[in-house]
Amino acid sequence: MASKLEYIWLDGYKPTQSLRSKTKIEKDFSGKLEDCPLWSFDGSSTEQAPGGSSDCILKPVFICADPQRKDGFLVMCEVLSSDGKPHESNGRALIEDDDNDFWFGFEQEYFLWDPETNKPLGFPVNGYPSPQGPYYCSVGANNAFGREIVEEHLDVCLEAGLNVEGINAEVAAGQWEFQIFSKGAKDAGDQIWVARYLLERIGESYGVSINWHCKPLGKLDWNGSGMHANFSNTVLRTAASEETYKKILEAFRPVVKEHIEVYGADNEQRLTGKHETASIHDYSYGVSDRGASIRIPLYTVQKGWSGYLEDRRPNSAADPYKVAARIIKTVKSAL
Ligand code: ADP
Ligand code: MN
Ligand code: MN
Ligand code: MN
Ligand code: MN
């Protein structure tokens, strides 16, 4: 039997990398990651290599079923240079979490976008819909736009075995969110990227594109899109100590610039201090505070300072690998 393996990777575009993929046919494929061969692609077509020596290597790192394709699998790959070392575009290779001590829950927000009007679903061709208010967690054709796409995406993700924890309609019209959690930073990143891939591909069949930009409606009075990073390690999960939490939270203060650098393009447009965000220039944390850079969930305090933290600054277009790698580095620096 011939299986279709869709090898997926991230290109070298700056500041925002995009998904690329191509199909490999394998005979009598076991379905296991270790039986996915290395492969290569033309890096000169993806901003990853010069034309004169264009081969880059695809190293499979994550596999799941492709529920939308007969005998199909989705294979997430790291990109290596021709010398076998991680390519500079390879954020996954930066993650120092080999024992999977770090757990991540990403909340991925995005807009469903009409390529013809260049506006979100639900926006009239001329002018604007009613202001924000009724759209968040809404039901009904006046307020919820594109649910058939969102539902199809949820079903396909679950069938693929991705650990989606929930979905909701968001604050702006045509804006939605899904959450994915994993006990392991690399795996959380893999799952977010595969879920993004599936959403993009489902959108194709509806003629709807996915807008990952963090502020696609610019300065208008509409929320932007984030990708809140909820994180914990053994220390955070079992601290039972406000002091330990403060020590870790203070470790983030001197490295605001290093975090913002990997928290997604154009984030200054979103982190304005309005629309449930903190200013990009500040660093703050607080219990239940959705206007802080890092929120301490009430849950964590109620459990006696054992739980997790939510960095609210990463945006919808950020690379979850790079976000996780940076958070791990800062948390480890405090311990
Ligand atoms: P909100 O919208 O209120 O910020 P969500 O329910 O959308 O919250 O997302 C919270 C996320 O936190 C979930 O994805 C969940 O998996 C994650 N989470 C819960 N506990 C932990 C933990 N111990 N470590 C890391 N992430 C966690
Ligand atoms: Mn060719
Ligand atoms: Mn959420
Ligand atoms: Mn949200
Ligand atoms: Mn959140």
Image (spheres, helix red, strand yellow):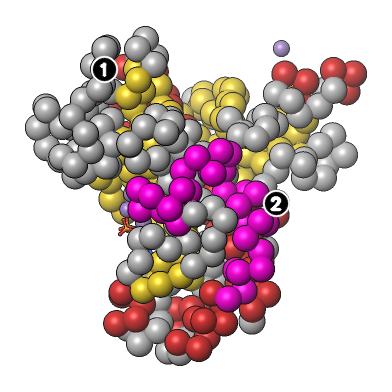
Per the image, is 108 magenta? no
Instruction: Please name whichever residue, 29 or 261, is drawn nearer the observer in this view of the structure.
Output: 261
Q: Amino acid at mark 2?
A: Ala
234 over 194 or under it: above or below = below
The spot of residue 328 in percent (x, y) is: 61, 65
The spot of residue 218 in percent (x, y) is: 43, 31
Q: Amino acid at mark 1?
A: Gly
Instruction: Rate crowding at label 1 as few (under 14), some (14 to 19) or many (20 or more) other CA atoms within 10 Å.
Output: few
Q: In this figure, what is the number of numbered marks?
A: 2
Q: Which quarter of the figure is the C terminus placed in?
A: bottom right
Q: Is residue 219 left or right of residue 78?
A: left
- Give the labeled residue for mark 2: 93
188 over 83 or under it: above or below = below
- Give the labeled residue for mark 1: 127
CA gap between label 2 and label 1 equals: 45 Å
Q: Please state the extent of the stretch shown in magenta in the rendering.
A: 250-278
* Helix, strand or loop status at disc 1: loop
Per the image, is 264 magenta? yes
Q: Residue at x 33, y 36 (%)?
A: 221
* Helix, strand or loop status at disc 2: helix
Which of label 2 and label 1 is nearer to you?
Answer: 1
Q: Residue at x 26, y 12 (%)?
A: 126
